[in-house]
Amino acid sequence: MRSEAGDPAASPADPLGGRRILVAISGSIAAVKLPLVVSALAKRGALVRCVLTPSAERLVSPVALASLSRQPVLLEEDQWSHGAPRPLHIELAEWAELILLAPLSATSLGRWVHGLGDTLLASVLLASEAPVLAAAAMNTSMWGAPSVSANWQALQGFEGVLPLGPQAGLLACDRQGEGRMAESEALLLALESLAVWGWRRDWHGRRLLVSAGPTREHLDPARCLTNPSTGRMGVLLAQAARLRGAQVDLVHGPLAVEPAWLDGLACHPVTAAAQMQERLIQLQPGADAIAMAAAVADHRPAQPRAEKRDKTALAEAMAQGWQEVPDLLTDLVARRPPGQRLLGFAAQSGDVLPQARAKLRRKGCDLLFANPIDRPGAGFGSAFNQGWLLGPGEREEAIEAAPKLVVAHRLLSALGALLTP
Ligand code: CTP
């Protein structure tokens, strides 16, 4: 049985820091992207070793990988010149806490699914119980071949494996279509999620609707009312849910973070609260749950203009007044179909809990995550978050300071537990 990678609550500051990660590279041209991924992992304090198939050796420099990982690279010939008492594939399989298998070629996929251990990399995969993030990459026609599709399908059922399908785009063979390996940012995110949560897809078969980021209310094309939300918390929540198997719709205002592409995560960009509301209402009926992480601007100008005003006219327009933006969350709660669960957010300064309790009652959502924004290292723009999760009955759970991905997984577990089986 493959092991679970960790309890989110016990994760260190960077979930990849100090982890023993085996980067297994097989023969697809996407292998050339791996040195930078290895470098990023090493900079984050992970202990990285690389193992290559014979064809990967021809595509990417073992010298580069060795110097970026600060470790000798394991090549096919090492299997036979190792000279150590224990077989190299067993030593590596037991050393690894996490395996990043990227790119996963058609051949290595076939070997793995059919239990063949005829390369060092293939035998490590068979011998290891560590969770594996497997990112496929190959030519479009190869990806579409019935045998490859069947192997990929079989991999979905493997315990301990988080499969990351390829995306569409221009391939190195000049074909346009599916086959590009997921971007490096997506690999790092999925690996972090594997370290924090593990590989189980407990949201499989569920649909989650997430809102994220600020909204913008324009006075004219040059000025707007907005807030410092970067959208990071909502984006991570959407991505974590996707990695746990949910189909996800992410309705977002202008973001300061680029959501890494994941198959099954649909982005719906909007600007103003009215557009966000319209989109959310459209998508609400199909959702099992909604997470309303957007920082919706509270007011909008009574008289927005399509052309730019001068300073004096602007001062007059600002004095003329503002309308309150309707509460999107309260409206969604009122419209919800039976069984749908809603998670609200509350960014607070001062005494968080009494304000959060009142907000939960006022909004009528099932769960409310309230976080302080006046403490260092949490809130807007920070990589970390902390707060309290308030919910049904007297539930008040303190969530200690942790990377936002860890918080996202905690919130998803709480929300998922409220869904009907
Ligand atoms: N929210 C919303 N529509 C609004 C304002 C907020 O749906 N017009 C949602 C947010 O997405 C969040 C929750 O309500 O999930 C709480 O947002 P917050 O800004 O803390 O609440 P407000 O009702 O605006 O209260 P405050 O007066 O504290 O700003």
Image: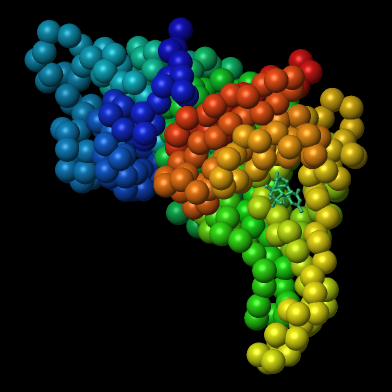
Rendering coords of residue 115 (x, y %): 44, 13
Q: Residue at x 47, y 24 (%)?
A: 8
Q: Which of the pair 281/182 is nearer the observer?
A: 281
Identity of the residue furthest to the left in this view:
83
- Asked if residue 311 can be seen in this view, the reply is yes
Q: Give the residue drawn at x 55%, y 55%.
A: 230
What is the x, y in percent for residue 348?
A: 60, 46
Q: Is residue 225 above or below residue 160?
A: below
Q: Position of residue 71 (x, y in %)?
A: 17, 33
Number of callouts: 0
Image spot of residue 331 (x, y percent): 86, 45
The answer to which of 229 and 306 lies nearer the viewer is 229
Q: Quadrant of the C terminus?
A: top right
Kindly indicate the quadrant of the structure image that contains residue 284.
Answer: top right
**Which residue is more in the foreground, 125 or 150?**
125
Q: Residue at x 12, y 8 (%)?
A: 85
